[in-house]
Amino acid sequence: MKSTLLEVRTGHSEVVQDITPQCATFAREAGGDGLLHVFVPHATAGIAIMELGARSDDDLLAALRDLLPADDRWRHAHGSRGHGRSHVMPALIPPYATVPVLGGKLALGTWQSIALVDLNVDNPDRQVRLSFLTDAS
């Protein structure tokens, strides 16, 4: 298995951040056929495969605001107002995704991208673990 750790700066606002280019580079360098596993080792972030760049990312953040409002209802209440919702989000958007790789290229659909979803405005720096598994792994 080949593995690397990406350092991603998400800033201090809610974000859906495209990490497809970094994933594609890693898959190309790993070469061959296999599976790319994308994992974010944080309790308040997730990985989504979705269309980006057509305001779908804004729609996702709006939907998450509706489902998980940033208010005082959360029992997990340290940090910024509504921080507890960030700890619930990974139950809806898991902290991982697996993508087929064929000939060193991500086998994503035409409009699919890989995104880091982060509602935690208290932590501007994230890590994403990329792991490439092949038959030889």
Image (cartoon, rainbow, N blue to C red):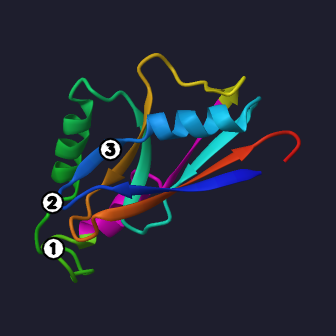
Residue under label 3, please give it. 17
| Residue 91 placement: quadrant | bottom left
Residue that lies at the very extreme toward the top in this rendered image: 110
At 22% from the left edge and 58% from the top edge, which residue is drawn?
A: 68
Residue under label 1, please give it. 73
The span picked out in magenta is: 85-100
> In the displayed structure, does residue 135 sit left or right of residue 81?
right
- Nearer-N-terminus badge (2/3): 3
Which amino acid does the dot numbered 1 rest on? Arg
Secondary structure beneath label 3: strand
- In this rendering, the answer to whether 69 lies above or below 34 is below
Comparing 7 with 114, the one in front is 7
Residue 12, given in percent of the width and then of the height, sits at 19, 62
Which mark is drawn over residue 69?
2
Q: Are marks 2 and 1 in contact (CB under 8 Å)?
A: yes
Residue 51, given in percent of the width and then of the height, sits at 36, 27
